[in-house]
Image (cartoon, rainbow, N blue to C red):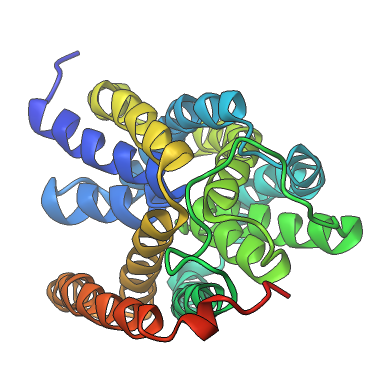
Amino acid sequence: MSIDPALALGGLVVGFVVGLTGMGGGALMTPMLIFVFKVDPLTAVSSDVVASLFMKPAGAVVHLRRRTVNLRLVGWLCLGSVPAAFSGVLLLRVLPLGDGFDDAVKVVLGIALLIASAGLVVRAVLQMTRRRSPLGEGPAEPSAPDVVVRPLPTVALGAVAGLLVGMTSVGAGSIVIVILLLMYPALKASQVVGTDLVQAVPLVAAASLGHLLYGDFSLGLTTSLLIGALPGAWLGAHASSRAPGGIIRRALAILLLASGLRLVGLPIGWVAAAAAAALGLGNVLWIAVRRRLADRPEQLAAPAG
């Protein structure tokens, strides 16, 4: 078994993004394997899922130690997602639905990611105007969020996420990040990432078992990816568990934007251009908003509500 340094470097980049934002495995690694390294799509998906089984815990442990994880949410999500993920792989083998089903799911999810990206921006502006600091939610705090967990909807949405992960090449992080953002807006950005990374471990384990049994897993390919992905996820998780919420939120918004555009069918070149434009123009607009709020202290003094 030979190790490919280029694959290891690609795994390092993807691992860092996964650790920082909680998503990016299916959105970045599978396309990278297919379009950059010319790997067969089935082998790319199977190897990506198995690699995530080892990559996710590297980031999850960091967030657990920093206490930026809502364990109740993790439990209810896993109750639905774990059996559904393995069942999805079995259903795909028994009832092959073809590329049309996979493409339709990707378009729907892509639209959801774009909406979630816009929602992050709107939420950030609202936080800046409601709090005394123009930095929004500020640095990540090692405390549990005051969130009222809704068990039945969380289990149901976890089951949908697990089923889609098992039946398609869509990444678990992309789905669950959107779920958490929509259902629990009170979660801080660091807590969204931490909760998603921890719940993804058993979910990906169930999907990995299915792909090991019925997919086209490559040991050499996965090993090369993990050499870079494991330290990358660890470093990214350390950054996200300590970084100010605004930085994590911007990284999430750009990644959601890029993933959504790619899922709805935009060419990779246009996706890269859109992400670069969002990074550059977004920072300029963000600075302008902060300066405007700084000049209007009466807005910053408004109660958080």
Kindly identify the residue that appears in the image at 48 percent across and 65 percent down. Answer: 133
Kindly identify the residue that appears in the image at 41 percent across and 60 percent down. Answer: 246
Could you say where residue 289 lies in the image, as x and y percent from the top left? 34, 82
Position of 103 with respect to 229 (left or right) is right
Kindly identify the residue that appears in the image at 35 percent across and 84 percent down. Answer: 295
Position of 7 with respect to 166 (left or right) is left
Kindly identify the residue that appears in the image at 61 percent across and 28 percent down. Answer: 64
Could you say where residue 50 lies in the image, as x and y percent from the top left? 45, 32
Q: Name the image quarter holding residue 13.
A: top left
Position of 37 with respect to 124 (left or right) is left
Q: Is residue 216 visible?
A: no
Q: Quadrant of the N terminus?
A: top left
Relative vertical location of residue 156 with respect to residue 13 in this rendering, above or below: below
Q: Quadrant of the C terminus?
A: bottom right
Could you say where residue 35 lies in the image, as x and y percent from the top left? 16, 56
Towards the viewer: 54 or 61: 61
Relative vertical location of residue 66 with respect to residue 131 in this rendering, above or below: above
Relative vertical location of residue 200 with respect to residue 231 in this rendering, above or below: below
Position of 76 with respect to 280 (left or right) is right
Could you say where residue 140 lies in the image, as x and y percent from the top left? 52, 44
Q: Is residue 238 visible?
A: yes
Figure label count: 0
Towards the viewer: 301 or 137: 301
Towards the viewer: 148 or 14: 148
Q: Name the image quarter holding residue 163.
A: bottom right
